[in-house]
Amino acid sequence: MQLRKHNIDRHQQEDFDVLVIGGGINGAASAAALAGKGVKVALIDRGDFASSTSMHSSNLVWGGIKYMESHDFPLVRKLCKSRNHLIKHFPSTVQEIRFLTTIASGFRYHPRYLWAGSWLYWFIGNGFTRIPHYLSSADIKGREPIIDIAGSVGGFEYSDAYLHDNDARFVFNFVRSAMDRGCAAANYVESLGAKREGQRWITQARDVMTGTTYEIRAKVVVNAAGPYVDQHNALSGERTEHQHVYSKGIHLIVPQLTEHQRVLAFFADDGRLFFVIPMGRRTCIGTTDTRVDSPEVQVTDDDIRFVLDNINKRLTLETPLTRDDIISTRCGVRPLAVKASSGGDRDFQQLSRKHVIDTDTATHHLSIFGGKLTDCLNVGDEIVAAVKELGVEVPYGDYVWYGEPHRAVREEFFHQARLLGLDDLAPHHHEALSTRLWRRYGAQALDMLEEIREDPRQADVLIEGTEYLRCEIRQAQRREMITRLEDFLRRRSKISLVVKAEEIRNAPGLREACEILFGDQADAKLAEYLDSAQAQSVEEMLSADAQVADSQVNNPAHSETLKWR
């Protein structure tokens, strides 16, 4: 909280080269790139960092094999190179994973045709990953016994990559990197619009937590507000060549379905891609690409039914999945860039997630449309180049602003972890404790080893069932700008994704976690979280009731059910 207050004070006292509006993956990468190269930058988000599109992804880092069908080979090439770059520079976080794709009889392409396409995909990606394999139905069953091969005509296996931790954590690490290099970043600060005065922008900002308004001065504004880019441009009077249309994505988190570390890919009944994705002791299932008109979306009864029906048809589970198996849900929009003149009339299913940067050279204003996590390093580099073209000095143009700490730092951490016997302190965790701490915190994990050495209680799991240690929560309090409890439970960690809400609320360590994070505000912050969780539960119940009622209006056969509800 002190860090956030300090940065808000800086917003009011300093003049910046660049103000980045929006702390999703585009804004976080832009801020990290600019700050890393010596540009004086501020970053704000009206919610928490990565609290919109960037926390609702499938956690996949893929080269866009989907776009092979539309022959968008330049985009596939660009995304594959980006994927390879992320695997190389974030080896602990972004790792190769196999995708096993099953093709049903009657699908629009034969499995051998798709297998040949996967080879072309591999060549386009410079042969960076393991080679593809054609699979008969028997091969598929041998590699993954839970797949129902009835009606299957074969399939193929190829490689892309995925995130070990959640997407929001990956995004925040870019924000943290930006702050380490001087960026004045603050969450829960809303832009009320900006206007150009002379040689700089004056942005009216509002501290969402206090209601206080103030001004931020910057030479350049980068609108990285994700699905709200168009709305903010309207506030600032900016006209752009592009605009957004929206694709809704829905995923369900359920108990672990298979111990094999691979993604299972199918084509759903309506032809859309459908994934079963490993998530530690949980599994993420779902699909994307439902066109919607607004960024505000929620999981519907139809969404849940669609996902459960499709997964139960394609897997031979001992007991079919039901609503009771759902631990949590992910639901968000993917903003897709289209030419404003087209009105988004192009076939929606053919639209890609490519990013576009609209530059207004007269006003020194940049807008980032579209984009995906895989492309984040390109976005950062392109924003730096665009800002430099607008006349902003970039002192350290050759500095590499991304990647994990140097190998020597990594070796020192693991050496100290072995001396401490760190992994023996958590023998029942899903993975080695040293590996997990390094992946999440990098060089800062060395400080956590010192804490554990001085006080072994710092290696205790504080919230049961989460594998998060007391020292991790202390780290979050010091360096991760936790403003609300949900920031920690959902975005800095993935606790609320993998643990049911009721279990979190009743966890004995939740109160102590609040004390560590918020000090004398612990009770208020805990009450805020519990009230929010209760309100969300009631809203979901009412939404389900409304959907049942709507579906029964023209169906008298279910009138008794309607009366009962």
Image (spheres, rainbow, N blue to C red):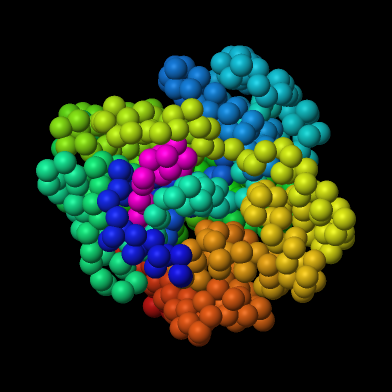
Image mark count: 0
- Please tell me whether residue 45 belongs to the stretch shown in magenta: yes
Give percent across and percent down for residue 387: 31, 33
Specify the quadrant of the image occupied by residue 395: top left
Residue ID at (71%, 55%): 446
Name which quarter of the figure residue 95 lies in: top right
Position of 219 relative to 354 (above/below): below
Position of residue 129 relative to residue 369, above or below, is above
Q: Nearer the viewer, residue 189 or 535?
A: 189
Percent coordinates x, y for residue 131 in the rendering: 71, 20
152 or 530, which is in the foreground? 530
When the figure is inspected, residue 472 is found, relative to residue 391, above or below; the finding is below
Q: Confirm whether the magenta stretch covers residue 458.
A: no
Q: Which quadrant of the rendered structure holds the C terminus?
A: bottom left
Q: Nearer the viewer, residue 418 or 328?
A: 418
At 53% across and 28% down in the image, what residue appears?
A: 82
The answer to whether 439 appears left or right of 59 in the picture is right
User: Which residue lies at the image location 12% right of the left edge and 47% below the top edge?
Assistant: 197
Q: Position of residue 533 (x, y in %)?
A: 47, 74
Find the magenta span and give its range: 30-47
Say whether residue 265 is visible.
no
Residue at left offset 60%, top offset 27%:
84
**For residue 488, side relative to residue 419 (left or right):** left
Hey, which residue is sitting farthest front in the picture? Answer: 395
* Residue 507 in view: yes
In the rendered image of this protein, does residue 427 appear above or below residue 355? below
Q: For this view, does 472 lie left or right of residue 484? A: right
In the rendering, at what x and y percent does residue 316 appear?
72, 46
